[in-house]
Image (cartoon, helix red, strand yellow):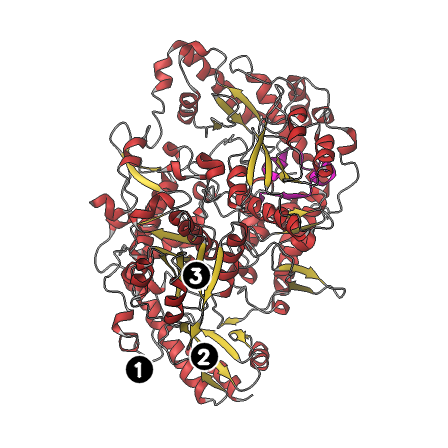
Amino acid sequence: MIRNYDKLIFELSKEGRMGYSLPKNEFEGYCMCCGIPAHLKRETTPELPQVTEFDVVRHYTNLSNKNFGVDTGFYPLGSCTMKYNPRINEEMAAHPAFTQLHPDAPTECAQGALEVYYNLAASLSELSGLSAFTLNPYAGAHGELTGLMIMRKYHMLRGDHKRTKVIVPDSAHGTNPASAAVCGLQIVEVKSTAKGTVDVEALKPLLDDTVAGIMMTNPNTLGIFETEIPEIAKLVHECGGLLYYDGANLNAVLGKCRPGDMGFDIMHINLHKTFSTPHGGGGPGDGPVGVRAGLEHLLPNPQVKKNEQGIFYLTTDEESAGCVSGFLGNFAVIVRAYTYILTLGRENVKMVGPLAVLNANYVKESLKNEYYLPIEGVCKHEFVFDGLADKSTGVTTLDIAKRLLDYGYHAPTIYFPLLFHQSIMIEPTETESKETLDEFIAVMKKVAQEAAETPDVVKAAPYNTPVRRLDETTAARFPKTTYKQMKG
Amino acid sequence: MKYFPHTQEDIDSMLKVAGVKSLDDLFSEIPEQLIFKREFALPEAMSEVEIRNFFDTLGKKNCKLTCFAGAGVEDHYAPSIITPLIQRGEFLTAYTPYQPEISQGTLQYIFEYQSMICELTGMDVTNASMYDGTTATAEAMMMCVAAAKKRRKVLISSTINPKVKKVVETYAFYNGVTVETIEERDGVTNLDNLRDKLQGDDVAGVIVAQPNFYGIIEDYTGVAEMCHEKKALMVMNANPSALAVLRTPAEWGADIACGDGQTLGIPMNYGGPYVGYLACTNSLVRKLPGRIVGSTTDVDGKRAYVLTLQAREQHIRREKANSNICSNQSLMALYVTIYTSLMGHKGLKEVNKLSYAGAHYLAEQLVATGKCSMAFDKPFLNEFAVKTNVCPKKIQAALLEKGILGGVRIADDMLLFCVTEQRTKAQIELLIDTVKNL
C-alpha cells in the first residue's frame, strides 16, 4: 500500500492516453459533426482525465486503501446497523438476467424481476406485521418522506385538511423533522422522560384535531424500548392521527416483535441496515415503506401486484400518494436484501434481534465504569454514553472518537442524540463476535485511561490514519469543490 | 448460521455480564402481547447452492432482449474494470464519510465526481450526488422555490420525460407548489407559451429537458434571458453523456442542471440503482441540498477532502430544511467517476458518434419500410420517435418474438427508439427486416 498517495485522477492525465475500447463504426455517412447544427453543440471541451485502464486500477485501488469499511474492521456506528454485508448478495444482484433488464421491458419479459420485488415486499410484511409494502423509495430518508406523503394523503382523502402537525420526540433522528418539513408538515416536539422514553403525559395535551400523526423509532435512538407504545397508539388513533415507525432501529426487534403489532400504521425499513445490503459509502440503499390494512391503495405508483394465475403486473392507483421514483426503486438492492432473507430463513431471522441486543448489552455493561451511562437498564441494539465518567480531563467525545481511529476502529456515532452533550452511541450488530467486542472493550478502557493520564495525547489524535485532523474551517470559508477551483 | 459468530458458551458468558439469565430476558420489558410467538411464514434457510439455483430459475423468467428502448435508461457499454473496483470492500462496505481521517477514499472520489459533473455540465458547483434523475429534478424544483422565497409556481415543459414530471408534481403537491405545463409544438417546448406563462411575475423556476423525451436536441436560444427577465430560474434536465457533445446547461444560461447519470455506463438493473446529479451556479450553492465535498489540508499540511458547507444540510436545519436527503448515491457516483475517467472526453464523444450513426441509420431504414415516418423533423442524437401506420403494439410484439425490445410506446401511434454504441449493424438489420415483413 502506498501510504502517501495523494494524486487526483486528473493529475495522471496525459494527452493521447485512453482507457476504453469501442467498436468500429459500421454506419458510414452518418456524421454527427454535420448533422447537428453548430449552435446546439458545446463550445468547450470538458477537461476529463485521459488515462489508461491500468492507471485507473491503481488509482482507485490506492484510494480504497484510505477507506475503512465493515470489511476492514469493527464499525460500531450507532443507528446505522453496520453489519456484515454478505457477498452472495452481490453475486445474485450481478446476475445478467437482472442487470441487463430495461425497466420499460414489458412485464411478461420481467416476471422473474417482479417476483423478486413481490416476494421481498411480502417477506417484509410478514416480518413487520404490516399489510403491504412498496420498495420504490431509494433510501431511508426517501422512505420517510414517502410515508409522510401517505399520511397526508390519507387525511386529505377524508377531507380532513387541517391535520398538518406531526409530533416528533426530542430524541428523534434529525431526518424526521426535515422529512416532515419537506412534506409540508409542521413539527411539534414531545419531550422525553428521565428514563429516555416519550412522556405520555406531555404527549396528551398535544393531541388534537390538527395532528396528522406521530413519528417514532422503537426502540428509540437511546436504544430504549418505548414500553408505553400500546397506550401511545391508542391515544394517537383516538385523536384521529396515524403512527409512523422510523425503521432505522428495526434490527433490535427483528424476529422478536413487529411494528404492526405495536399499533403503527406506516413504516419504512432501511434495507442497507437491517437487511445487510452494503452502505456503499453513503448509498445506494433502499427505503421500503409498509402500511397497515386499509392504506394499501395509498402506496406510491407504480405498484406490483399478482393475479390469480400467479402473473405479476404493474398498476397505478388514482388515490396513491404519488410517484417518488423513476421506476421500482433500487432494484439491485432489492435483490440483495431478498438473498439475505432467503439465506437466514425463518429459523435464523428470529435470532437477529436477540443477538444484536446481547452484543449491545455486553459492551454497555463492560464499559459503564469508564464511560458515563446516563440511563441504566437493559438496552436494545444500541446504547448511549454521555462522554467519559471522569469529566475532569477535558477530553471530549470527539477526542475519544479520533483516538479510536488510531486503534483501528471506526468511531461510534457521536454528538447524537442531542439529549446529551457528549453522546457516544454504540451499535455493535449481531455479526460481531465476542472476541471482537472484547478487543474493542479493552481499547475503549485504554482510551479512558489515556484520557486520565495523558489527555493531550488523546486530544491531538489521530496519528496513524492516512490524514490527521482536518482544517474544516478553511474548507467552508473558501470552498473548493472541484479540481478546477483547486487549481485556481 | 454462518453470519452469527456466537457459540452457546459465548452466549452464556455474555448473558452473565449483561446481568440477565436468557436471551428472552433481554426483552422482558416489552409488553407480553407484543412478543411475536408463531413461526414466520418465510422459507427455510437456503444454502448458497440453493440460492444460486433459485435465482437462476428466477432469472430465466426474464427475457434476454436486444435493447432498443431508451426513455431515460440506455444500454451503454461499460468497461469491465468498473465493477471489480467499486466492489472493493473498502468502498462497498463503508458508510457515509463521518470520520474523514479514515474516509479519504470516499471523499476523494466524490471530489473527482463533482469535478467531472461540473466539467460536463459547465456549472460551477454540484453536490455529492442524488438518488436518481427524477428526484434530482424534484429537488431542483424545491431549490427554485426556496430561492424565490415567495413564489410558489414552477413551469415544466411538456417535452420532459413524463416519469420525471410525475415525481416533480408529487414533491410539489405536498409543498403547496403549483406545477404548470408548458405546451409543446412540433415536439419541442413552445416558447411563445412559455413567454405567456411567465407574464404573471409569479414563476420561481422553469424546467426543460435536453435532449427532450422525444430525443430531440432542443434550441433553447433566448430561454435563459426570458426566465431571468422575469426573475425565474432556469433548470435544465440533461443527459450527462450527451453533454460531451451538446451545448451545456451553463452555455444555455441555466441556473441549475440536473439529470440521471445512468447513461454514463450504469447497467439498466431494471430501474436502479442509478445516480442523480444536481449542479448549479455559485450564487445558488447555499440552496443546494445534500452533501458537498471540499478540499482542505490536515494539521500536517497534507492534502485532504472533507464534507463542507454543512450548515445547509437537513440534520442542522431540521424543521427549516428544504430537502431531507441525508447521504448520496455514493457507490454509483464512484461508478460514473471511474467510467468517465476511462472514457475521457474522446471516449464520450466516440460513444455519441457511434450512437448517432446507428440511430440515424435505423431511422432512415425504418422510414424506408413504409411502416413508419419520423414523428418530428428535428435534430436528434441517439433517440427518435416515429409515427407508425400499423399498431405500435403489433410492431413491439413482432420484435419481441425476435428477442428485440423494440422501442417504448409513447402514444397510440408512436414508438421511441434508442440506439447505443452497443447495437451492431446485424441487430439493427434484424429489427428493420422484422418491421418490413409485418
Q: Residue at x 58, y 44 (%)?
A: A271
Q: Chain of mark 1?
A: A
Residue A334 percent across, percent down from the top left: 58, 51
- Would you identify the image quadrant in which residue A308 lies? bottom right
| In the image, residue A261 lies in the stretch drawn in magenta | yes
Tell me residue A151's x, y (percent).
63, 46
Mark 3 nearby-residue class (10 Å; few <14, some 14–19, many ≥20): many
Q: Which residue is mark 2?
A: B428
The three-letter code of the residue at mark 3 reads: Leu
Mark 3 to mark 1 CA distance (whole Å): 40 Å
What's under tag 2, amino acid-wise? Answer: Ile
Q: Amino acid at mark 1?
A: Gly
Pointer 1 residue: A29
Q: Which residue is mark 3?
A: B155
Labels 2 and 1 in the same subunit:
no
Q: Secondary structure at mark 1?
A: loop
Is B309 or B13 nearer to us in this picture?
B309
Locate the C terminus of chain B by quadrant.
bottom right
| Chain label for disc 2 | B
- Decide whether residue A386 is among the magenta residues: no
Residues marked 3 and 1 touching at CB (< 8 Å): no
Instruction: In the rendered structure, find residue B430 and report the number of the disc placed on it.
Output: none
Q: Residue B208's x, y, as percent? A: 40, 63
Q: CA distance from mark 3 to mark 2?
A: 38 Å
Describe the element under mark 3 as helix, strand or loop.
strand
Q: Write the start and end of the magenta stretch as one range.
A: A246-271
To which chain does the residue with label 3 belong? B
